[in-house]
Amino acid sequence: MSAETWTIRRVLDWTRGHFDKQQVDDPRLTSEILLGHVLTLPRVKLYMDLDRPLTKDELATYRALIQRRLAGEPTQYLVGFREFYGRKFAVDDRVLIPRSETELLVEAALRDVKKDEPSRVLDLCTGSGCVAISIAAERPQASVWATDLMPGPIEVAKKNAEALGVDGRVTFFQGDLLAAVPEGATFDVIVSNPPYVKTSDLATLQREVQKEPRAALDGGADGLDLIRRVVTDGLPRLKPGGLLALEIGDEQGDAVKEIMTRAGCRDVHIEKDLARHDRIALGRAGS
């Protein structure tokens, strides 16, 4: 960028073109999100004041974000949040960035959790807490528990629960899957978005994805290590007829269906995402 006056219009035009040349995903949206973050403005407000010049400090901050984005840092980490199920969740490099596909996991749980009846829901591998918190926000009568192996995600999730007004109804436990949950506790619904990428595929992921926590991505040699454990350990903790819902990889439907069926789940089926890929595995505990 030269020393000439840089208005919002000029900054956005230049950045879109630069990101496009550097093959940054969605260059226009990325430019708007980063500039809106610097100016503390919603994206729509940028277009209401296109001729406003940026100050030297604003321009310097924006330039620094551009360089970090070009170095592969995800946009969501740069601005510190991600929209999910109509709410803004804080994220940083301790947690997986919530994906729109994971909203299907929330919807699967909400179909089973009645609005006006008490229920207990468990979210395994909670990360940012986006699934657990969304369920709690949508179902005020539900008691939601959530676990994660590492302290960092638990810290992020607790802050999100407080910021989104459900901290009194979501209980977080640090530990290894069901081992973190008090012995004897049972649940109406267990949900999980566990790591499900094959170890050998990690190096082929987009550069931005490789910036996310490896522990939240690595599902072992066949991508199913954590899924097997969630099914095996989770099924005995479900009440009769309780729902087990898992997010899975786009080619894992048949394998996960077999794992769940062999473990004793009934009514096992796979739901697809908007791209028609395998995405959510569902099954029920026997009665």
Image (cartoon, rainbow, N blue to C red):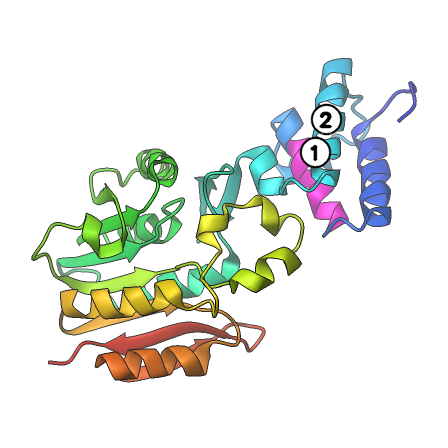
Indicate whether 36 appears above or below 271. Answer: above
Q: Residues within 10 Å of mark 2 (few under 14, many from 20)?
A: few
User: Can I make out residue 215 in this image?
Assistant: yes
Q: Of helix, strand and loop, which mostly describes the magenta segment?
A: helix
Q: Position of residue 279 (x, y in %)?
A: 46, 71
Q: Which element is circle 2 on?
A: helix
Q: Quadrant of residue 256?
A: bottom left
Specify the segment rendered in magenta.
26-36
Q: Nearer the viewer, residue 129 or 254?
A: 254
Q: Which amino acid does label 1 sit on?
A: Arg
Q: In which quarter of the image is residue 155?
A: top left
Q: Position of residue 131 (x, y in %)?
A: 36, 53
Quadrant assignment for the C terminus: bottom left
Q: How crowded is mark 1: few (under 14 residues within 10 Å), some or many (20 or more)?
A: some
Q: Where is residue 152 in the image (x, y as percent from the top left)?
A: 38, 36
The label shown at residue 64 is 2
Q: Nearer the viewer, residue 282 or 203?
A: 203
**Is residue 275 part of the magenta span, yes or no?**
no
Indicate whether 40 appears above or below 189. Answer: above
- In this rendering, position of residue 256 left or right of residue 166: right
Q: Position of residue 183 (x, y in %)?
A: 9, 54
Indicate whether 202 appears above or below 44. Answer: below
Q: Which element is circle 1 on?
A: helix
Q: Are marks 2 and 1 in contact (CB under 8 Å)?
A: yes
Q: Mark 1 points at which residue?
A: 68
